[in-house]
Amino acid sequence: MPTRIGRSLTAAAGTLLLVTAVAACGATPAPEGTGNSSQSPSAPATSGGQPSGTPSATTPPAAEPVVLSANVKDGASKVTVDTLVKVKAEAGKLTKVKLAYAYTDQQGQREKGTVRGALSKDGASWTAAERLEPSGQYKLTMVGRNADKKSSTKTASFTTHNLSLDQQTFPTFYPLKGSKVGIGMPVVLNFDVPVKNKAEFEKNLQITTSPTQAGTWRWFSDREVRYRPKHYWEPGTKVTVKANLNGVNAGNGVYGQNSAKTNFTVGRSFKIRVNLASDVATVYKNGKKVRTIYVSGGKPGWATRSGIKLIMAKEYNKKMTNEMIGAKEDYSLTAAYAMRITNSGEFLHSAPWNAGYFGRTNASHGCVGMSNGDAAWLINQTLIGDPVITTGSNKGMEDGNGYSDWNLSYKQYKKGSAL
């Protein structure tokens, strides 16, 4: 029979085997809160030592490729010259855009180059700064990259429609570039082919003045538009004018043939006030009276027009004949100094043959005559665009007869704008 000690050892051994067997098969979990971590179940480990239940790091998916597109299709033909080429990028940014061209101009000269353009700040779009040329071959190269900075390139080639000279209108500016003009001089823009779409053209006219002064455009006809300030130009004003009209739709199948620009400076203030009632002309420079000139204006039936005129041109040894104005009297005279002030034939000029009438009687066929000495002095002092302010007759100025711009109020003048 076993002793007490023997029975105790046997019982302990049996208990140990039972606990070991239970732990090995995992049938009964250890009680919670025992604090014995060796009794808690643990997750199996992976070969890398990380628990198999924890997600591992993965490579992010590749970014979508950048998508490049333009408003002109590859292979397009007869694209109108008023098209402004535009490019955009989706799922990325543009890095480079090139629009190359080749065409033959009206003189048969082959022209090649690239069209300027501007990239948006976010790189999502590009817009050409110029329209297209007729009968041109164009190649558009678009380069962009996606979020992964992977670059893509796309090209498109196209041609433009043909235009005859009758389908193109050419702009001409006056005053000429670098001129110095009088305080009344308007900006004059003429076209050789009529413009029907005036609003579209006017939107593409830009004028910059220093110092800044209010002003407006006014259409005098389908072939002429002018700009004048609200008041006479301030002396010393610098003016820059641009007509970005190349390719602009003028209406009736006509397009702008070219862009043009000019710049000029306004001189001192110089005004000539002609009083036909007293036959005296008073000259003011920078507001100060500098000369009194005795004159003779148009006689009855040939009255000189009252109103504000501008010096349009200065001529020497100008031949004056009755045929020029349709007068019945037969005459042919030569004025040593002549300053044109209307299209219809009015001049300020030397007229020694009428010396006996100066300061006394109006005896001319519409011009304002004066002595050789006064005319020589005046022609040397004046600039194109100096105002000649005439009073004393019942005959007024016709709209468009010379630079008649100042005979309208600013409100009336502005009504002639197409915008």
Image (spheres, rainbow, N blue to C red):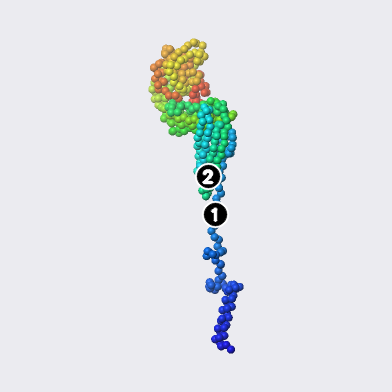
Label 2: which residue? 144
**In-front residue for pair 38/310:** 38
Q: How crowded is mark 1: few (under 14 residues within 10 Å), some or many (20 or more)?
A: few
Residue 38 position within the rendered picture, expressed as x and y whole percent measured from the top left: 53, 72
Residue 197 position within the rendered picture, expressed as x and y whole percent measured from the top left: 57, 30
**In-front residue for pair 182/271:** 182
Q: Which residue lies furthest to the right in this view?
A: 27
Q: Which residue lies furthest to the top in this view?
A: 330
Looking at the image, residue 177 sits to the left or right of residue 31; the answer is left
SS state under label 2: strand
Looking at the image, residue 329 sits to the left or right of residue 267; the answer is right
Label 1: which residue? 60
| Residue shown at 45% from the left, 13% from the top | 333
**The residue under label 1 is which amino acid type?**
Pro
3D distance between C-alphas at marks 1 and 2: 22 Å
Q: How crowded is mark 2: few (under 14 residues within 10 Å), some or many (20 or more)?
A: many
Tell me which numbered mark, 1 or 2, is placed earlier along the sequence: 1
**The residue under label 2 is which amino acid type?**
Gly
| Residue shown at 56% from the left, 88% from the top | 3
Residue 355 position within the rendered picture, expressed as x and y whole percent measured from the top left: 42, 13
Residue 66 position within the rendered picture, expressed as x and y whole percent measured from the top left: 55, 46
SS state under label 1: loop
The image shows residue 183, relative to residue 138, as above or below, that is above
Q: Which quadrant would residue 282 be assigned to in this image?
A: top left
**In-front residue for pair 126/411:** 126
**In-front residue for pair 246/202:** 246
The image shows residue 49, relative to residue 334, as above or below, that is below
| Residue shown at 52% from the left, 14% from the top | 326
